[in-house]
């Protein structure tokens, strides 16, 4: 079988008008040039996409509603973990079982007698956390509250401090929350550094024997625990119910 002769096809020597206009856009000053200027590697790319300047200042009165919503959102992210941890401890399970057994003789529905104690216990835990962390404290001896603000003016975090109960206890963080849209961007670390500087200055002005900062953290808040341990904080105790810790306290000598 004879092969058919190949026909040589010549490429056009000139580019049509569309291609002549397209190549400059793809040249060194166009799209290709911009692609060459992109940094290589994850770290360099993160630096190229670095957020705008972050500063900490005192909260303004018109920012109070926004800060309250931020605190409430932060508590909602925590309260479910705390409630689950608290109600799955053996003493709590025994109390819930006893309450359900007692209600079984009063209520006609077995399901209602079983679920009502659990619902009331979860509601009590959530209301307690919201009352403790979901509102703004009054201004104390350390001033504040303070907010973290991006260069564009976006409020992305809130911080409040209070003196310790006795002399030598140092300062305590009473509120520390970051907007969910700005987490893992260094806002919490920036607020923590500001709190340390404020506690150090307050201790020096008050003649305290040492500068110290205490930060309470709810159980199962692994992100906050990792941040504090990475900054040199150590767990020293906490508080809870029925012998089980619900909130751990981390401290650091400044």
Image: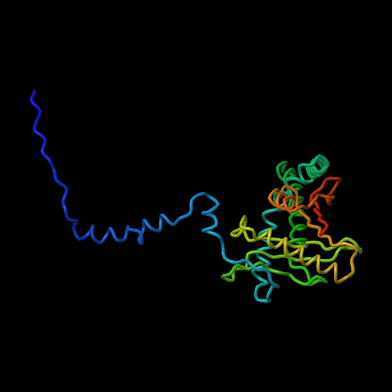
Q: Position of residue 245 (x, y in %)?
A: 82, 47
Residue at point 48%, 51% (across, down): 40
Quadrant where the N terminus lies? top left
Residue at the image position 78 percent from the left and 66 percent from the top? 161
Q: Is residue 184 left or right of residue 213?
A: left
Q: Quadrant of residue 252?
A: bottom right
Q: Residue furthest top?
A: 1
Observer-nearest of 207 and 215:
207
Q: Is residue 46 left or right of residue 240?
A: left
What x and y, as percent, mark residue 209?
90, 63
Position of the C terminus by quadrant: bottom right
Which residue is depicted at the point 59% across and 59% down? 181
Q: Quadrant of residue 87?
A: top right
Quarter residue 94 falls in = top right
Residue 143 % position (x, y) = 78, 72
**Taking 115 as reference, is 53 left or right?**
left
Q: Residue at x 74, y 62 (%)?
A: 175
Q: Return the x and y of residue 76 as percentages of the image width and height.
A: 68, 56
Count of all numbered marks drawn on residues in the image: 0
- Which residue sits furthest bottom? 61
Q: Nearer the viewer, residue 12 or 94?
A: 12
Q: Nearer the viewer, residue 222 or 204?
A: 204
């Amino acid at each position: 079988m004879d092969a058919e002769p190949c026909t040589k096809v010549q490429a056009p020597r000139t580019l049509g008008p569309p291609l002549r206009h397209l190549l400059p856009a793809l040249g060194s000053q166009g799209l290709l040039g911009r692609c060459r200027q992109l940094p290589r590697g994850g770290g360099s790319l993160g630096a190229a996409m670095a957020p705008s300047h972050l500063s900490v200042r005192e909260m303004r009165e018109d920012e109070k509603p926004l800060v309250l919503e931020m605190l409430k959102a932060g508590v909602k992210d925590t309260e479910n973990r705390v409630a689950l941890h608290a109600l799955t401890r053996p003493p709590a399970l025994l109390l819930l079982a006893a309450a359900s057994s007692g209600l079984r003789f009063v209520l006609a529905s077995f399901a209602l007698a079983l679920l009502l104690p659990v619902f009331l216990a979860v509601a009590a835990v959530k209301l307690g956390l919201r009352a403790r962390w979901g509102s703004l404290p009054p201004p104390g001896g350390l001033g504040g509250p303070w907010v973290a603000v991006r260069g564009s003016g976006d409020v992305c975090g809130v911080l409040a401090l209070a003196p310790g109960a006795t002399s030598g206890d140092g300062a305590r963080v009473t509120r520390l929350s970051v907007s969910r849209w700005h987490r893992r961007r260094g806002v919490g670390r920036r607020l923590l550094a500001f709190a340390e500087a404020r506690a150090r200055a307050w201790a020096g002005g008050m003649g305290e024997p040492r500068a110290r900062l205490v930060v309470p953290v709810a159980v199962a808040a692994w992100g906050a625990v990792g941040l504090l341990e990475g900054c040199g904080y150590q767990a020293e105790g906490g508080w809870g119910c029925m012998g089980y810790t619900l909130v751990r306290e981390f401290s650091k000598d400044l």
